[in-house]
Each structure stands twice: as structure tokens, then as C-alpha cells.
Image (cartoon, rainbow, N blue to C red):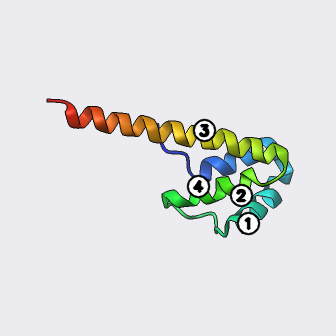
Amino acid sequence: MTRPDLADARRAVERIYGPQAPGIWAELLSTARLHGTETDPGAIDRLLDAMRSAAPVTALCGEALAIRLASYDRLAQVYELMRSSAP
């Protein structure tokens, strides 16, 4: 399992919007002040904020990705906790 990133968000936008996706993706990146190649953990957070403030379908997609991201982060924390307490 990998942490959701900008590539995952882009694929989600492409699945939802099909041929309109490039324009919507560019708009989201502009709103989030991203280039689309960032790999730092904060980039996906900024993009999710932009998605949540966009049109309703995009906002719902952003919310779904946010849930996935939060789930990943919590599972990773539990995994680290279990690993650090193992004999």
C-alpha cells in the first residue's frame, strides 16, 4: 500500500472527467499553486484543499481521496507502533 499522491489524484480526475480532465487538472494545480510534479507530502494536502473547494463532483472526489489519505496515514502509524514494540 502506498500513500496517495498527486499521480493518484490525477488518475481520479481523469476517470471522472475523461476528455475534460486536462483542463480541470490544470485548474486544480493552479488553484493549489502546484506544478504537478511535486512529491512532498504537503502537495497532496494542498491539492485536496483545491479539489474540495471546486465543483461538487470534484469536491466529492477530493473528499474520497482525503479519506484514503487519512486511512493510509493512520495505518502507517499503527504499523510503526507495532514494529517499534515488537521484540
Q: Which residue is mark 3?
A: 67
In the picture of the structure, the residue carrying the numbered disc 1 is 31
Residue 78 picture quarter: top left
Where the C terminus falls, by quadrant?
A: top left
Q: Is residue 74 left or right of residue 49?
A: left
Residue kind at label 1, given as amino acid type: Thr
Q: Are marks 1 and 2 in contact (CB under 8 Å)?
A: yes
Q: Which circle's residue, 1 or 3, is located before the other in the chain?
A: 1
Residue 14 position in % (x across, y down): 75, 47
Q: Which residue is mark 4?
A: 44
Residue ranking furthest to the left: 87
Q: Is residue 15 left or right of residue 85?
A: right
Q: Please report whichever mark, 2 or 4, sits nearer to the chain's N-terminal start.
A: 4
Q: Earlier in the sequence, mark 4 or mark 3?
A: 4
Find the distance from the CA under tag 2 to the CA under tag 3: 15 Å
Viewer-nearest of labels 4 and 3? Answer: 3
How far apart in space, not on screen, are marks 1 and 3 (Cα)? 21 Å
Question: Which badge, 1 or 4, is on the more N-terminal residue?
Answer: 1
- Give the residue displayed 34% in from the left and 34% down from the top: 79
Say whether residue 19 is left or right of residue 28: right
In the rendered structure, which amino acid carries the disc numbered 3? Ile
How packed is label 2: few (under 14 Cα within 10 Å), some, or many (20 or more)?
many
Q: Is the residue 7 above or below the residue 75 in the image?
A: below
| Residue 73, percent from left and from top | 46, 42
Q: Residue at x 65, y 57 (%)?
A: 47
